[in-house]
């Protein structure tokens, strides 16, 4: 039967404590990163009959593959769209019927060079909201095209379903009635208040804080065990 000397037991305790610290810190870092792994949209204003700027953003590829294009579908109820020209990106517009006067139905940004994960890219669209959109939640399905494969951010949460539980939620914006106050959108990884979706979702923050706390506690245990080992050596 194998026996362990006190020194070996202390070394094993230190090793286990170090592993615990690493796991805790990894959880603290991974949780916010997981929360940001979506295509998001924020808006400065979303009022029926009014105008606002939608900002679509991403900071990841398709399972690690660099991004080459982002196709944004425009829903019914949006009466006008004016995409912002971005250096290093070509912008193309698809309209209903007449390519000069028809309503914009899709905006595509194509990169001159593929964008690796870890770099945030944001596109601004100036849009107009129809009078009939008051109180509606508008979804903007997005196709993220990558060097290898693509991701369709098009899932819509059914009533009572948390959009954060979806694998590839579509960005959404809730339109307010004229004169209404409060949030003009909600996370889907979209929000109408200009806040990032990671800030709107408390779960990643809570998980990160918990993981950080566990990691720090384990690290303290490891340091104490190491000091005891050295003092007895």
Image (cartoon, rainbow, N blue to C red):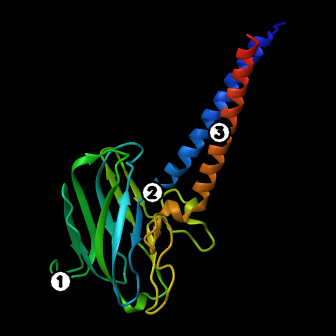
Q: On the rendered image, what quadrant is the N terminus found in?
A: top right
Of the residues tagged 2 and 3, which is closer to the observer? 3
155 on left or right of 144: right
Front one among 134 and 179: 179
Crowd around label 2: few <14 · some 14–19 · many ≥20 (10 Å):
many
**Residue position marked by numbered label 2 in the rendering:** 38
Of the residues tagged 2 and 1, which is closer to the observer? 2
- Image height of 181 relative to 208, above or below: below
Quick one: SS at disc 3? helix
- Image height of 68 relative to 80, above or below: above
**Residue position marked by numbered label 3 in the rendering:** 216
- The residues tagged by marks 3 and 1 sit, at their Cα atoms, a distance apart of 60 Å
Residue extending farthest right: 1
Residue extending farthest front: 231
Quick one: SS at disc 1? loop
Front one among 115 and 73: 115
Q: Residue at x 58, y 60 (%)?
A: 165
Q: Are marks 3 and 1 in contact (CB under 8 Å)?
A: no
**Residue position marked by numbered label 1 in the rendering:** 101
- Image height of 54 relative to 97, above or below: above
């Amino acid at each position: 039967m194998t026996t362990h000397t006190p020194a070996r037991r202390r070394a094993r305790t230190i090793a286990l404590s170090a592993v615990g610290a690493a796991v805790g810190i990894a959880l603290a870092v991974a949780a916010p990163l997981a929360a940001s792994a979506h295509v998001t949209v924020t808006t400065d204003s979303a009022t029926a009959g009014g105008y606002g700027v939608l900002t679509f953003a991403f900071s990841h590829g398709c399972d690690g593959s660099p991004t080459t294009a982002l196709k944004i579908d425009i829903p019914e109820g949006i009466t006008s769209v004016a995409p912002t020209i971005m250096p290093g990106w070509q912008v193309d517009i698809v309209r209903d019927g007449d390519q000069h006067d028809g309503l914009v139905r899709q905006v595509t940004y194509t990169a001159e060079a593929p964008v690796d994960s870890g770099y945030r890219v944001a596109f601004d669209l100036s849009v107009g909201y129809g009078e009939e959109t008051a109180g509606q939640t508008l979804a903007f399905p997005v196709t993220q095209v990558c060097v290898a494969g693509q991701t369709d951010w098009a899932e819509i949460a059914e009533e009572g379903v948390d959009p954060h539980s979806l694998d590839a939620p579509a960005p959404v914006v809730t339109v307010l009635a004229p004169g209404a106050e409060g949030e003009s959108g909600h996370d889907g990884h979209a929000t109408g208040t200009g806040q990032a979706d990671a800030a709107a979702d408390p779960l990643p923050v809570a998980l990160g804080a918990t993981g950080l706390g566990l990691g720090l506690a384990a690290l303290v245990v490891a340091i104490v065990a190491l000091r005891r080992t050295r003092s007895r050596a």
